[in-house]
Image (spheres, rainbow, N blue to C red):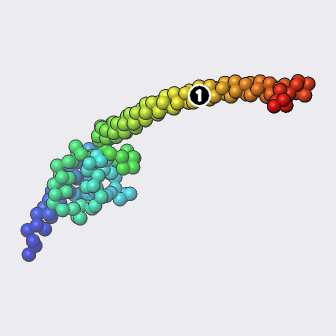
Amino acid sequence: MSKPSNVDRSQWRTKCRQRLAEHINDSLDLTIDPADVRLIPSEEDPYRWKRSSEKEYLFEKHLSKLSVGPLMELCKGVGTSFQAVRPSVEVGKKPWNETQDLRDEISKLKEERSEIMQLAKKARSETILAKRHSGKYKREYCELRRKYHKQQQLLARYKGLMTDLLRDSESIESPSLPRRYDKY
């Protein structure tokens, strides 16, 4: 005697195969025996499944390996979440629902834009901070240059005074002049 859960799963699998076979017949005008319907069609099968990205996981296993939940989802999603197409129409594993892909892409682009905006805001604040520091350093530099030029002027002035003093002292010690200090 079979377990009730296995009986339930077998009934859903049969119902799902029939629903998929009807869909193939309606969409492609092909008569496929429900027992021959495959979620992973072989090269010889005259149909493929074009599916939305949300339902991709349903097509990763064979019908016989699915539990009741995924079988119910397959029955419910026939013609809306996925559809049968001829092999020449299928393009790899691209999702059937292109609007969802566009929504996903837009969402991804919005996230990237948000990240870029935050990076730009951070860079802007760092630039403002750097300009503040730069202004401070420029003021300090100008003050130091002013002090340097003042010191250079003082040095030139003192050098001139020293030169004058040396000249005066040489003229005082000159032998042509009488020595005043010899008298004492």
Question: Where is residue 100 drawn, in percent x and y?
Answer: 29, 40
* Quadrant assignment, res 15: bottom left
How many marks are shown on the rendered structure?
1
Question: Where is residue 134 drawn, in percent x and y?
Answer: 50, 31
Inspect this view and state whether residue 109 appears. Answer: no
Question: Where is residue 47 drawn, in percent x and y?
Answer: 32, 51
Q: Say which residue label 1 marks.
A: 147
The residue nearer to you, when weighing 32 against 72, is 72
Inspect this view and state whether residue 67 appears. Answer: yes
Question: Where is residue 173 drawn, in percent x and y?
Answer: 85, 29
Other-residue count near label 1 (Cα within 10 Å), few / some / many at <14 / 14–19 / ≥20:
few
Residue depicted at x 23% and y 64%: 64
The amino acid sitting under disc 1 is Lys
Residue depicted at x 27% and y 55%: 57
Q: Is residue 99 above or below residue 94?
A: above
Outermost residue, right side: 176
Q: Tell me the element at label 1.
A: helix
* Quadrant assignment, res 6: bottom left
Residue depicted at x 9% and y 71%: 3
